Image (spheres, coloured by chain):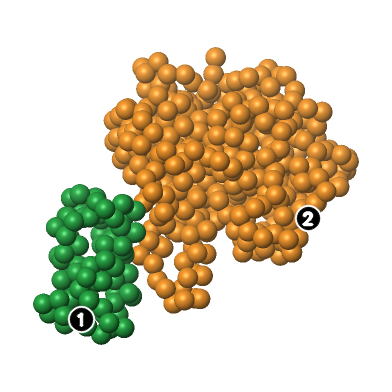
Amino acid sequence: MNKSLDSIEKEVYRIVADVLKIDIALLEPETDLIDTFQADSLDALEIVLTTQKVFGFEVDDSQIPMLRTPKQIIECIADALKIENQHTVSI
Amino acid sequence: MTLLLDLVFYKHMQKQVVVTGLGFVTPVGSSVESFLTAVTKGSSGIRLIKSFDTSKLRTKYAGIVEDFPIKDLLTDKELSRLDRTAQFSILAAKLALDDADLLKNSSMSGSRVEEPDSIGICMGTGAGSVGALEKSYKSFFENGQSDVFAIPSSMHHSPTGNVSIKYGLHGFNLTISTACSSGAAAIGVAFNEIRYGNIKRMVAGGVEASITKCHLENWTAMRVLSPEKEEPARAMKPFSKNRSGFLLGEGAALVVLEELESALARGCKIYGEIVGFGSTSDGTHIVNPSFEGQALAIERALKSAKIAPEQIGYINAHGTATSLNDKVETQAIKKIFGKCQIPISSIKPITGHMLAASGAAEFATAILAAKEGLIPPTINYEQLDPDCDLDYVTEGARKAEIEYTMSTSFGFGGSNAVLVSKRWN
């Protein structure tokens, strides 16, 4: 299946909104999920676990505390899947 | 000599402990008024189980909590991560703390207690958050899926922990699991914490929400549940020879216990005084009760209350409507009270056996009976059992002037907990 950065972005937004039980329209790339939506360590883990399942990769535990915004999560996935400059990738 | 002085001093240090708040989430309502009306009128909360298919099950009925107003108290995120046990507890705690006038900014979502270090929580649960546990096991064994929220939501301590977080109770935090006596034991432990001067106030009681298909079938396998289908509200017949077992119930019952000086200083209402707690272990069999163990718990509760058996005016019995319980409990009562004429009743046919929540709800019932001067009846009684020959208040609610009441709770594993309360004048 081919996934573009756009589709990853949409999927990440959906996962974050679902885990935090918020309206997806409230999410911006730079939204700090901890400051804005009081996300806690369990929320962060749930978001990471779900993204791992959906995209088929593994996030190093040390990276988890750094994933505070949708943009950071998307970049982490793109990096893991080796997507550069919005190229399409096969996953 | 030093030891003697210590003992005298210790006795004088004992605080009087009163009940200043009640919170119910039960099959017969979530207010003190609705609960009291149901138990005195004998209106049953037994209903058909609708949360799963019971068409092929031997027992299809239980005491079910319907439409409890929890959505106003929790966000969607919180709701999705809290088992029914924690939800019941959060609502019952809100009702009890509000009743005791201990919440500031008492909005539905953001209430906190004043003086958080002075108030703690001690709750009992028998089965724990079994609904969340079953859900996580199903997901894991069927799909290999683990869940970040499974452990925090399914542990026995989840209800207690979540109530303390919700209302900011920083003084004490303990969960007790002694099967069906858990709620009464939790109240007893909380009582002692205040009585011996360790803390000023405690939220205490029990919760249970274990009406899942798996749990129900496991109870059925033990052949203790009534298979009654024609008249489910009449299924439970405590102390009656034609009994057929009990029905499960669910709910939460919490009380606010408070040092008398604190309650008087606040000028709040007082439902009654808790004066004694007795606890023993049968040490004989995992499910069969022992009348010696139960009798010793009754004796210890009386000693703790510093009263004689004849001063008790009403006993709210464990009364589960199993032949073994009814017979053994009657034997235990007779061992301590003789062939007495103390009125005894069981409200379990009304609520179902709410396990840990029952012990707490029944303690509250005894407090209310003394306050109102009205003893709730044992409903559904039909046939005299020669082994159960005491006064079970079978004719309907009975008016009575009661000073001291007793509430008995006995659990699998041989854990006995007996509470004594006194009318507040």
Please report the residue visible at 49 percent of the width from the left and 38 percent of the height from the top.
B69
* Amino acid on which disc 1 is placed: Thr
Please report the residue visible at 31 percent of the width from the left and 62 percent of the height from the top.
A14
* Amino acid on which disc 2 is placed: Pro
Q: x and y percent of residue B23 in the render?
A: 50, 33
Colour seen for chain B: orange
Image quarter of residue B336:
top right
- Residue B352 sits above or below residue B126 on the image: above
In the image shown, does B424 or B163 lie closer to the viewer? B163
What letter labels the chain drawn in green? A
- Given contact means CB atoms under 8 Å apart, are the residues at marks 2 and 1 in contact? no
Q: x and y percent of residue B350 in the render?
A: 70, 38
Q: Nearer the viewer, mark 2 or mark 1?
A: 1
| Quarter occupied by the N terminus of chain B | top left
- Residue A10 sits above or below residue B380 on the image: below
Please report the residue visible at 65 percent of the width from the left and 45 percent of the height from the top.
B63
Q: Residue pushed farthest left?
A: A85
Q: Disc 1 marks which residue?
A: A88
Using residue B298 as the reference point, say whether residue B319 is left or right of it: right
On the same chain: label 2 and label 1?
no
Q: Disc 2 marks which residue?
A: B227
Label 1 resides on the chain identified as A
Image quarter of residue B265:
top left
